[in-house]
Amino acid sequence: MAALGGRGRVAAALLRRGPPPGLAPGPRRHRYKEKWATTAPRIPPTRLALHHFDVSYSLQLKDLWPSVRAGLLCEQKYGALLNNFSPVDHVMQELELLNATDFVSEAPKRMQRSQRGAEEAGRGESGSQEGSGEGRTVIQAEVSPPLRASLSSNIKCYTFPRGDITRFRPARPDALGLLDYYLMDAASLLPVLALNVQPDEFVLDLCAAPGGKTLALLQTGVCGHLTANDVSISRTKRLYQILRSYLPKEIRETVSVTSCDGRDWGQLEGGTFHKVLVDVPCTTDRHSVTEEDNNIFHKRRTKERQLLPMLQLQLLMAGILATKPGGEVVYSTCSLSPLQNECVIERAVEIAETQFNISIHVEDLSHFRTLFQDTFSFFSDGRLGELVLPHLTANFGPMYFCKLRRM
């Protein structure tokens, strides 16, 4: 026993010294397997999103991508949507003293001023050419019908000029407890303006929460009836909170808030609405590169992200089917991705024609580019619809919107 014990001590000493020269060490045995999943470094979803965008958007936007990228990574700019159900005159005066302007009402004024300048220049040139008998067409100083139609709303949204990074103060309650304005990305109003709600029309906001666009629709003061739907019950609670904070009871009672799966709406109330807003879930590009929480680029949400275009298509088709013949749908996202924007529009138009025998006309919204070029930076090479690009001097968006008419 003593001899065996001696041999054991010698073997232990040899093992401590390591293997003889020329022999590789044998594999070490562990009592438990190493937990690689918990020890390997995790890549933050924000970095995954930025890498994904660098690869895809640099091909789409080319030389514009570096400035758009910088805009996405910097602080977002906001607009103050005035609450027409609260006294706003003193709020307007306060904001104007800070050099903020209502971009909705200011846009046609700027256009008229520029057209008058062009008219005067045209008259000057035609006068100088009278001797030679040459004439020149004079540009009329009036806003074209599509522009007038898009601005026939009571929406007022104040923004600071390009390059001005002043922040708005938090909203304040009036004597009745209603807040005086709602802070939001001013580009989010463009789909609402494009929808161009007319008096007494029935309107559906298919993916309404958290409620900014719903609130903007109500600020027009002309909705015959508004249905605000969102599949998420928790987000619908947030929508209720927004409505209570900004609207008197008699206005809230004109709004139907539902929590249905928007994909089924065409079957629930098909051919019912004059106007439908389909502001779909998307990759929310700005959020994806700046916020870890609720980030769709988290690895556990990979499948959900890959299925987004299919979900968006289903929601848009439900919106089309919920619209009366002659009615209009505005589709919008806060993504730069063509797969979530133009491709969804093209596929929906095709499916409506082939499977439902519904003819869809894609409306031209290029006048929005002309009208709001002083406030937003637009992408000029899109195939369908309009796209607001983030830019350091006008850091709104991204916001894509496209208008469809059901024939």
Image: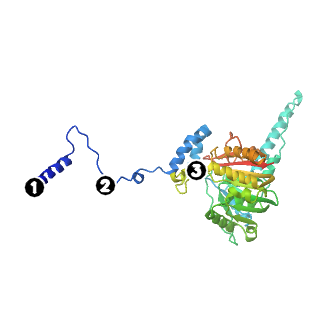
The residue identified by callout 3 is 305
Q: Which numbered disc, 1 or 3, marks the residue closer to the eye? A: 1
What's under tag 3, amino acid-wise? Arg
Residues 264 and 136: in front is 264
Which numbered disc flags the more N-terminal residue, 3 or 2? 2
Q: Is residue 246 visible?
A: yes
Residues 203 and 10: in front is 10
Packing grade of label 1 (10 A; few <14, some 14-19, many >=20) is few
Residue drawn where x is 52% and y is 55% of the image? 292
The residue identified by callout 2 is 31
* Quadrant in the picture for the N terminus: bottom left
Q: What's the mark number on residue 2?
A: 1
Residues 354 and 138: in front is 354
Helix, strand or loop under label 3: helix
Considering every residue shown, the one lying at the far front of the view is 1
Packing grade of label 3 (10 A; few <14, some 14-19, many >=20) is some
Helix, strand or loop under label 1: helix
